[in-house]
Image: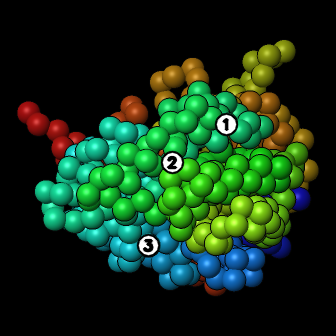
Amino acid sequence: MFTSPCLSVNEENHLTIGGVDTLSLAKEYGTPLYVLDEDAVRRNCRLYVDSMNRFYDGHGLILFASKALCNTAMCKLVASENMGVDVVSGGELYTAYKAGVPMEKVYFHGNNKTEAELNMALSLGVGRFVVDNQSELLELDRLAKAAGKKASVLFRITPGIDAHTHDFIMTGKIDCKFGVILENGDAMEIIRLASTLENIEVVGVHCHIGSQIFDLEPFCEAASVMVNFLGDVKDTLGITLSELNLGGGFGICYTEKDDPVPYDQYMEAVSKVVKATAEKRNLPLPKILMEPGRSIVGDAGITLYTVGAIKNIPGVRSYLAVDGGMGDNPRYALYQAEYEFLVANRAGSAKDAVYTVAGKCCESGDLLGEHAPLQTANSGDILAVLSTGAYNYSMSSNYNRIPRPAMVMVSGGKTRIVVKRETYEDIIKNDCE
């Protein structure tokens, strides 16, 4: 019935997450409210870590793509599950640092890192810089020299693979803001240049072909292309690179029509390609890194809202307005992301109505979904939007000066606040007269 196994319906016909009644959560913490099932997140982490140990004999590391959900509680959680963290900004890096994530397990991505961010990463002892372009490479070499350090780098390579996903989240094709192109020789040239720089140590390469991908084939193709590139680097430059980061992008179930492959099957299929290609190219098996984000937290989270106005336009549509919207979930406005909706206080009842779910922002495009099947709703009901653990909090804003929601984690029937609800004082605290 549900897109996530951590959800169920109790004897009162209320939606529960991790065994906790969502109506009690809404009453205790208010709405809008992000809720994350910690036990489900840990199960997902362990699936990946165990798969890495099984299929690569432990010769690798799972990095949580913190852009999916970055706060200190989440960073502490993944570190406790023997994972590293992938960060893409100074803010994400600082969060991981304050959470106590071992810096040698932090990989710093991003296509336009600032001088301040690079210096922060050098001073904190970040494990790896994932360098995006030649300008960054030369800047990093200069800053590392000034700091008396040597920076260990991977290069983000654009492998030219169509990942069969939405254009906005497709990152492996040639026309992309990320990385250096493999096909025209730029990737080989930047590694050659880096090998001549005194304060740079080239340890590997990285690729990421996109997000919310359901097919095995693009991942296997990317693995083949990248391992063959390692072989080309060895043959051409005489350099044996020791790390291969194959990124993330594994799809999750947002609606019933989504059919993701079990994540351990992704890991197994890709491992066979990596091993066979490395053997064919006479390469030692590189250390493998992968960066799941959405598939760790996406279906482990929901968002709760209170229903406000309900407006029926005969022959057109019925609008159901909630006390949040694009400020706490901009994904529908950005790329028409689809969700499953439930009236949480009648979660087990049949869906006998259709609504366009509207937010409270002063924008006609502030929608969470259109023509969504739902139980008949009334003002004051609690609306649950499923599979919102990834990117909703990360992408949230204060548009219209609306405070961001709180976030609660549930585990073993107990609840705890991991992000406080913003107040109006929080909204104005950085204003200057």
Q: Earlier in the sequence, mark 3 or mark 1?
A: 3
- The residue pinned by badge 3 equals 105
Element carrying mark 1: loop
Element carrying mark 2: strand
Q: Nearer the viewer, residue 127 or 44?
A: 127
Q: Is 92 situated left or right of 427 in this image?
A: right
Whether 294 is drawn above or below 43: the answer is above
Q: Earlier in the sequence, mark 2 or mark 3?
A: 3
Which of the 4 image quadrants contains residue 16? bottom right
Q: Amino acid at mark 3?
A: Lys
The image quadrant where one finds the N terminus is bottom right
On the image, the x and y values in percent for residue 153 come to 40, 58
Q: Rate crowding at label 3 as few (under 14), some (14 to 19) or many (20 or more) other CA atoms within 10 Å.
A: many
On the image, the x and y values in percent for residue 47 come to 71, 76
On the image, the x and y values in percent for residue 306 come to 60, 48
On the image, the x and y values in percent for residue 204 come to 51, 60
